Image: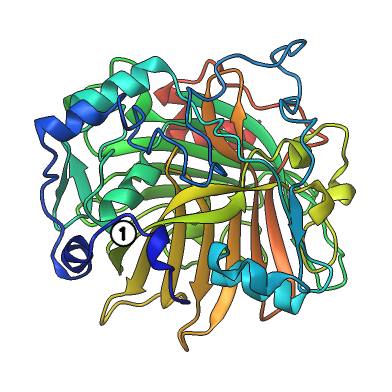
Amino acid sequence: MNAIPANTLRFGAALMLGCAFALPAVAAITAAETARLGRDLTPLGAERAGNAAGTIPEWTGGITEPPEGYSVGDHHPDPYAADEPLFIIDATNLDEHRDRLSIGHQRMLETYPSFRIPVYPTRRSASVPQRIYDATRAIAATAELVDSGNGVGGAVIGIPFPIPKNGLEVVWNHLLRYRGETVGCIMGQAAVTRGGAYTLVKASLEAELRYSLPGMTVEELGNTMILYKQKVLAPARLAGDIILVHETMNQVREPRNAWAYNPGQRRVRRAPNIAYDNPGTTSDGLRTADQLDMFNGAVDRYDWELVGKREMYVPYNAYRAHSGERSFSDILAPLHVNPEHLRYELHRVWVVEATLKAGATHLYKRRTFYVDEDSWSILVADIYDTRDQLWRVSEGHVINYYEKPLVWPTLEVHTDLQAGRYFAFGLDNEFEMCTWDSRLTSRDFTPAALRREGRR
């Protein structure tokens, strides 16, 4: 990893030593720190003020109302459509911008002459419902890491660690961030060859985000934080495959429960392989199971170091890539997605270094995550192989949705620099929009319900 300029770090050396070498401890947030939420810090813990240079503005609440003319069910129109790029980074001017780019983005610019990073004005659009802000403040002094950081206690609904003290707390904020209550989506995914060929896989996704449900309590939540189901709709050779996941919070104490239905066998079977570095579903081996949503699942195989906070160019407000006026073929190009439809902005991100523990196994020896301070979404990840060579670069191209204010990737891209290929997930340009008012209940996420759905 390249050196981080001193003026971009927000933490002192003493705290860094503690984060790097101390075991995770109970969140030590004081009453004085809690009082900062909603004052000099945003309600979720970001710095409310802009930066000294004026290139990052003050957070003033994010997007709280949709653009004029929007109706639920529409592709989400770009509220910043009038913005023009401030500049475009490519191989010719890379050296001027290295200190604000991840190693992965630098390598992509060096490797692919056709890749570029258009940098737009920074728009701090992130917002969530008021009840998430209220819950974050309520649990700030009670949330704690438990079982050596493998779980979280004393927290529900809100962001558990708005003023994080170590890398694990930042990652748990990502895992438990608000993404709605129930959601139903039709999404496309494509494993793109070096020459640009691909077969689009169409799938339906449904989830109940139990941790965020209104009125949820710590006791009722127990250890199950998400219920998730994915069904392949096309192509015909894959259609009918379904996976069901009960995502546990502490996966060392209770591993993720997963089942799979195969239409050829017409049986529901346990699927313990949907975890860690096993291949992601229909990804042609271009992402691991724990790369969905940039990172998911158990945290026990890595040591997590909080490096600090940094100003970086990251994917943000990706309404151009989300637009219903574009086709999948507009987005998917050889070697990388079409940069003409991408948007990057300067934002402050938490930098977390995940290093494989001694004796643990995983395809990835090291992963550097860049986590948005405003939404706690992982926006970029640099991923290294067992030789400690940069292997893959992951990007979460996020938008703020309008049905319910929340930040979520409209497109994930996992680029394999060694193979010259990439995997795109979440394509929705040609499909109907996700729904957050779906009538899903926990009964829709049982093995029996999976069996009934598979036989329809």
Name of the residue lying farthest toward the bottom = 387
Name of the residue lying farthest toward the front = 53
| Secondary structure at numbered mark 1 | loop
- Image coordinates of residue 265 in percent, x first then y, are 60, 52
Q: Image quadrant of residue 286?
A: bottom right
Of residue 115 and residue 394, the one placed in the foreground of this image is: 115
Residue displayed at 72% across by 78% down = 110
> Is residue 231 visible to the viewer in this orientation of the structure?
yes
Is residue 262 depicted above or below 384 in this figure? Answer: above
Residue displayed at 70% across by 55% down = 424
Residue displayed at 38% across by 53% down = 297
Mark 1, residues whose alpha carbon is within 10 Å: few (<14), some, or many (≥20)? many
The reply, left or right, for residue 261 in relation to residue 333 is left
Q: Label 1, on which residue?
A: 299
- Image coordinates of residue 205 in percent, x first then y, are 60, 36
Three-letter amino acid code of the residue under disc 1 = Val
- Image coordinates of residue 47 in percent, x first then y, are 37, 38
Question: According to the image, what is the colour scheme of the structure?
Answer: rainbow
The quarter of the rendered structure image containing the C terminus is: top right
